[in-house]
Image (spheres, rainbow, N blue to C red):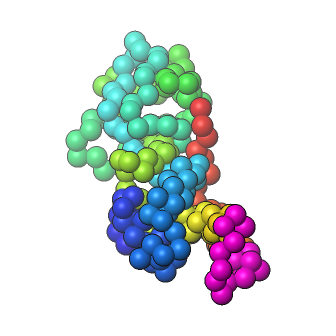
């Protein structure tokens, strides 16, 4: 799996659930479970932006689109032929709401005209983004599958489904998926915080 968009992730959920023919879950139920998984706060990827240029006369820069929580800022004389941008100390700047605020003494360390490379976490949107990281893909698939099993418990309790699966088997399967979700979540970055 290289990149997975929402529809490709949904196909993987169908395979995981062995429900490609929509026997156990409707397409709407699987879509809802997958949307909940994509909306999980751990579904973030590293994001770089290089649209800003340092100017000694400006202290507050509007955060570029797509930049959520800033991890680090790097500098380089220009944004062409980049080989090794230099990380700047975090005491030179602060993430101030929708702005990046540079301290007064930052101009002593950063030259005018230097490109700013902002490293951040980007919250992925199921309508617009694709998931590239293998661990993150597996996490979203497992979380969506876990959500659908919760739905199955509700179905069984509310509709009194007659099949050869006992409630105990469903609970066991749900616990196994929950352990898988917890294991996969622990391998993902946790720096994303809603502002």
Q: Residue furthest right?
A: 168
Q: Is residue 43 visible?
A: no
Residue 169 inside the magenta-drawn segment: yes
Q: Position of residue 160 (x, y in %)?
A: 69, 72
Instruction: Name which residue lies at 63% across and 63% down.
Output: 151
| Farthest-out residue, bottom | 164
Q: Looking at the image, which is closer to me, 15 or 96?
A: 15
Between 170 and 181, the one lying in front of the other is 170
Residue 16 left/right relative to 183: left
Quadrant of the snapshot with the C terminus = top right
- Quadrant where the N terminus is found in the figure: bottom left
Write the residue at 53% across / 49% down: 39
Q: Which residues are magenta?
A: 157-172
Figure label count: 0
Q: Quadrant of residue 53?
A: top left
Rendering coords of residue 97 (x, y %):
55, 24
Say left or right for 79 vs 42.
left
- The single residue placed furthest to the top in the displayed view is 57
Locate residue 34, reporting x and y percent. 50, 59
Residue situated furthest left in the rendering: 80
User: Toward which corner of the image does residue 7 lie, by quadrant?
Assistant: bottom left
Q: Residue at x 38, y 48 (%)?
A: 127
Q: Is residue 110 above or below residue 28?
A: above
> Vertically, is 8 above or below 103?
below
Q: Residue at x 70, y 64 (%)?
A: 158
- The answer to whether residue 192 is seen in the rendering is yes
Q: Position of residue 187 (x, y in %)?
A: 60, 64
Taking the magenta stretch, the answer to whether it contains residue 9 is no
């Amino acid at each position: 799996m290289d990149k997975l968009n929402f529809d490709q992730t949904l196909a993987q959920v169908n395979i995981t659930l062995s429900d490609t023919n929509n026997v156990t879950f409707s397409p709407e139920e699987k879509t809802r479970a997958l949307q909940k998984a994509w909306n999980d706060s751990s579904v973030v990827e590293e994001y770089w932006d290089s649209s800003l240029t340092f100017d000694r006369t400006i202290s507050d820069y509007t955060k570029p689109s797509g930049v959520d929580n800033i991890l680090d800022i790097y500098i380089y004389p220009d944004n062409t032929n980049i080989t090794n941008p230099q990380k700047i100390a975090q005491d030179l700047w602060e993430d101030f709401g929708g702005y990046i605020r540079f301290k007064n003494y930052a101009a002593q360390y950063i030259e005018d005209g230097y490109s700013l490379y902002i490293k951040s976490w980007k919250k992925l949107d199921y309508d617009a983004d694709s998931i590239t990281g293998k661990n993150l893909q597996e996490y979203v698939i497992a979380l969506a599958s876990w959500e659908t099993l919760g739905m199955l418990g509700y179905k069984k309790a509310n509709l009194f489904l007659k099949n050869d699966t006992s409630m105990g088997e469903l609970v066991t399967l749900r616990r196994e998926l929950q352990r898988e979700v917890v294991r996969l979540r622990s391998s993902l970055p946790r720096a994303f915080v809603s502002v």
